[in-house]
Amino acid sequence: MTLNLNIFTLNCWGIPIVSKNRKERIEAIAKYLLKASHNIVCLQEIWSEKDYLYLKDQLQNYLPFSHYFYSGVLGSGLCVFSKWVIQDVFFHQWPLNGYIHKIHHGDWFGGKGVGLCRIKCNNRLINVYCTHLHAEYNEDDIYLAHRVLQAYSTAEFVNLTTSPADVSILAGDLNTAPGDLTFRLITHVPMLIDPCSLEYKNNDRIDKISGTCDNINNSYSDPKLVKICPQGKRIDHILFHVNPSLEAEVVNFGNPLEDRVPGEQFSYSDHNAVNLELNITTHKNNKLKQRQLSIEEHLHDTIQEAINVCKEATVTIAKSKNFFITTGGLIFMFLLGSVGFWPNNILSDIFRIIITGISFYYIIMGTLWNRIEMNSLKAGLTALENFNKSRNNKL
């Protein structure tokens, strides 16, 4: 018996107040999903609970089972809709999620992580993982170590929870392109397959999949980035793994949504959607097995590169600790030494309050926050080293 899986994923850019045309776009996404043939839907950046409840209400007749992963201050933004019963759910929040003082980035406030919905279809179990990794934001990429450990934590979570599922699907905005370290971690550790590395029914390679971020056809793309790379970056993905006794055939894979919402001048989101359709049968798939063995050959180098990134990050964090404590201490000493020399007026009082706040901010960042970040980094680093050591011993 053939099981048809038609998976859809989209970063919906649903930030209240900030995101342009949010209400209209959420309504358009609901209309599209009602007409489409997707039976599993993974959405990211649904930051408003009202938007999730609206989608749930609109899709209840076609995708009657759903789950929203609550987390952090704003909520994880992750939700899953399914045609079949969601049997179990679990959310794994990452210990490293950016910085609380980077309010304009906001990742920390989302309490990001990876959500698992175990879906039961007849006698088959399907693990659906929905996630959204930390973004780069700038060329310096100060969040590289955070994203690397998020990727490894996600990869290990998938690796350890895949059994007893027949099929595992990881979908979401990974904020990483094929070939990047974080992408290799996510695919290599649990041996997830990128559909772009396989072939269609007619044996044509899938080489024309558009970038999902800053694509020239998206109305919200950054014009400067579009000039550099009109196709954009492919950072939204649907990856899969099947039980060795099963065969997975890629029926369709691509970007399903139109460039613009029908009748409007704007796109469905600032990201492009991704769709993957699989036919799962009971025949053993030697091609997938060979592909997984090929992935495993590069696993050691990938893990070692991640270890190096984490080691560099520990040095950077140690330096930042000295900077924060020294700066905060000097400001505090200045405040103590200047007692009695301040003029007695409102402006002076306000200035002293601000200076005191800055002093305590630096001291807290150099002590409590630095310790939390360092311990989280060390936890990930030791896990990577243990993974590498155990695999080397097997060899």
Image: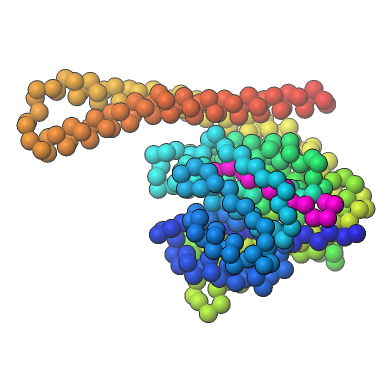
Task: Residue at 76%, 24% (x, y): give it.
Answer: 390
Specify the farthest residue to the right.
283
Colour mapping: rainbow
- Judged left or right of residue 101, residue 352 is left
Task: Residue at 64%, 33% (x, y): give it.
Answer: 305
Q: On the image, which quarter does residue 361 sit in?
A: top left
Eyeballing the image, is 65 above or below 378?
Answer: below
> Where's residue 108, x and y in %?
47, 41
Q: Please state, as top left, top right, bottom left or bottom right, where the N terminus lies in the image.
A: bottom right
- In this rendered view, identify the residue nearer to me: 32 or 226: 32
- Judged left or right of residue 387, residue 347 is left
Q: Which residues are magenta?
A: 112-124
Asked whether residue 235 is in view, the answer is no
> Where's residue 220, x and y in %?
49, 65
Specify the farthest residue to the left.
344
Eyeballing the image, is 198 above or below 356?
Answer: below
State whether the magenta stretch is mostly helix, strand or loop: strand
- Judged left or right of residue 343, residue 111 is right
- In this rendered view, identify the residue nearer to me: 374 or 62: 62
Q: On the image, which quarter does residue 300 sit in?
A: top right
Task: Residue at 65%, 36% (x, y): give it.
Answer: 152
> Where's residue 387, x and y in %?
71, 28
Q: Please state, as top left, top right, bottom left or bottom right, where the C terminus lies in the image.
A: top right
Marker count (numbered): 0
